Amino acid sequence: MCNNKTPGWRDFCFYNPLSGPTKRGFFMSMKAEEKQEALPEDLERMRHSTAHLMAAAVQALWPDAKFGVGPAVKNGFYYDIDLPVTLTPADLGKIEQKMRELKNKKLPYERMEMPIDAAIEEMGQRNQPFKVELLNLLKEKGSTAVAKETGDDDAVGVDDSSGASQVSFYKTGDFVDLCRGPHVKNTSEVGAFKLMNIAGAYWRGNEKNKQLQRLYGAAFRTKEELDTYLWQLEEAKKRDHRKLGQELDLFTFSDLVGAGLPLFTPRGTLLRRLLEDFLQSLQEPAGYQRVVIPHITKSDLYKVSGHWDKFKEDLFHVTGKSEEEFCIKPMNCPHHTQIYASRKRSYRELPMRLSEATAVYRDELPGTLQGLSRVRMITQDDAHVFCTPEQVVDEALKIYDIVEKFYAPFNMKLSVRLSLWDPKHPENYLGTPEFWEQTQEILRNVLRTKGAEWFEEEGEAAFYAPKIDFTARDALDRAWQLATIQLDYNLPERFDLKYVAPDGHEARPVMLHRAILGSFERFLSVIIEHYAGAFPAWLAPVQAIVIPIADRHFDYASQVLMQIQGASGATLTSTFRVELDEARESMQKKIRNAQLLKIPYMLVVGDKEAENATVSVRLRNGTDLGSMPVAAFIDRLRNEVKNRADNNA
RNA sequence: GCCGACGUAGCUUAGCUGGUAGAGCAGUCGAUUCGUAAUCGACAGGUCAUCAGUUCGAAUCUGAUCGUCGGCUCCA
């Protein structure tokens, strides 16, 4: 459920034509994204050995099995296997049982080496076509890595740069596998494991190839670690925003409207407005001006921007009465350039900061849609800054400030990545090496000035310029890439944007693309799970509910309600969201209902409270704060909202 | 899009190898007036996702469509 399998939210504005051969939806992003952290060597070895153990078990149960690859991965391992039967979850139990049986035999992992031609012969005889393919690759290239021009020196068994002559095998019981190793000594050293699920996976990740059955397993050194991991999975499941979204009545989907097209209920909409309001309160003082653009455009716009040829299949197309070709916007930047281009601009107008919270639509593959994380409608908190080259650093710093201020109340740790180009593959990028060095240095300068701690990663840049990406860690320590600051020298060129410089000559502005919360849909999915639906008061759709104990308390209860509502401020943020539970139910039942809706404050009122003009305050975690004057409660709530306090778990 | 699992009332779900749908919660009505997570009873709610087909007969079998879920970049 939480995994690290999805690449980052690259090119939040642009399409990246270089998203790679497995591009599944051009807005590939929308899941927890975590760089694969290097595994400790011994853990990796143990997991890999567990993969072999599973393969041995599968071979024992289905002697016809043809094996692909079986590496150690985060949290465990997998093995891709071609089987004559389609496995069911019940089979996992059988395989697991067999694995335990083999494990208890303390079978050794025996290494042996042989010349590559003999190995090809051997694997051919064993009817292992995938292994033969790998061996042939090893023989020719000395590596099995998928990337064609891999500079992968790690590929073992390389005698010289062109190919391998000697390869190693590991034997466990009756199972013999081409493998560079290393492995544990024998199967008893394999730790705690559990087979998790079965998935389809293409041989060598290429959809033109045969699809194999991938068996995923979790594996850890100890049973305790495995249990912790399983607990985390459970916890993540409980927090699943799809489930909470329904339970808390935040959003819904309709078969009639279609997959990936969320409908936001009043409560969910309120949440979005509160987030937007907060963001607006940060960016307006920073000089951002709001704009509005149509949701459709002539395709000409994308023909000029350069997106049309590559991405027209991923757009929704619209036909009208005329011959003209329209489509629904999948991004906003080209539209925004046209506001800039509407008249001659002077350097005195710059920086011009155009912002908009607006929806874009992308025709994602149906199989990739998922809750609010992966949708066909994405509401971006988009903004484009048009500025002179000299202003870039300042503007980026301003954006950086907004990011920091925005994330502070959420208590999510941010990490900062400078996304660089890949100098080994200049053909994948626009611009000269000098351009890249300069622009990367500009962003480094931003980070240095900010005193930021950051890491750099090659190959993560947009194809047109480097960027700064922010990753936030949630309460379950999952990482999500949300905010981004991207340089862009390309689009101003494409649209021939200009400004008149102080010397009277025309010059080219630079564009910065930025997102603070990424998209409202995705950000909501993240904070729903981060808070497990128990939003802090400043975000809670209902902040407090008044619960009269008996009918005779209804009058006093509505007085309390009006008193609190009357204390509201004039803005959306300072308006108190309080309800009165008038149902003719027991007080206990009302408390339970409020509890299930994760309402931060329950204000119980009965005879005592009516007499003393107080409310009895219960928190959703069960804490009873006792009675306090209504005014005292209002102060408490007001402060909490004002400070965007993140307490009252 | 591809592989697999799945779709029964608003929600959670029972329904064995085909004989014509059962419950809890939510809802409505009535009784209860309650001190910190479910008061009691009655009623209502389903062309079993949709559309075709097989059959005397389909929630159950087959096919298509729509939708949901797990995966589809981890490289011996």
Image (cartoon, coloured by chain):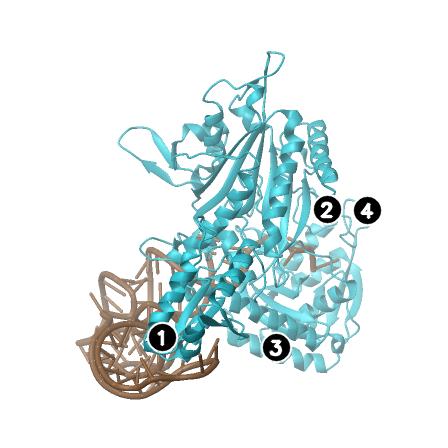
Chain colours: A cyan, B brown
Marks 2 and 3 sit apart, C-alpha to C-alpha, by 40 Å
Along the horizontal axis of the image, is B29 left or right of A444?
A: left
Q: Which residue is mark 3?
A: A96
Q: Are marks 4 and 1 on the same chain?
A: yes
- Three-letter code, disc 4: Asp
Q: Are marks 4 and 2 on the same chain?
A: yes
- State the SS at label 2: strand
Q: Is residue A516 above or below residue A267?
A: above
- State the SS at label 1: helix
Q: Can the viewer see residue A212?
A: no
Is disc 3 surrounded by few (<14), some (14 to 19) or many (20+) residues within 10 Å?
Answer: some
Q: Which residue is mark 4?
A: A160
Q: Which residue is mark 2?
A: A455
Is disc 2 surrounded by few (<14), some (14 to 19) or many (20+) residues within 10 Å?
Answer: few
Which residue is the extreme one toward the front? A612
- State the SS at label 3: helix
Is disc 1 surrounded by few (<14), some (14 to 19) or many (20+) residues within 10 Å?
Answer: some
Marks 4 and 1 sit apart, C-alpha to C-alpha, by 87 Å
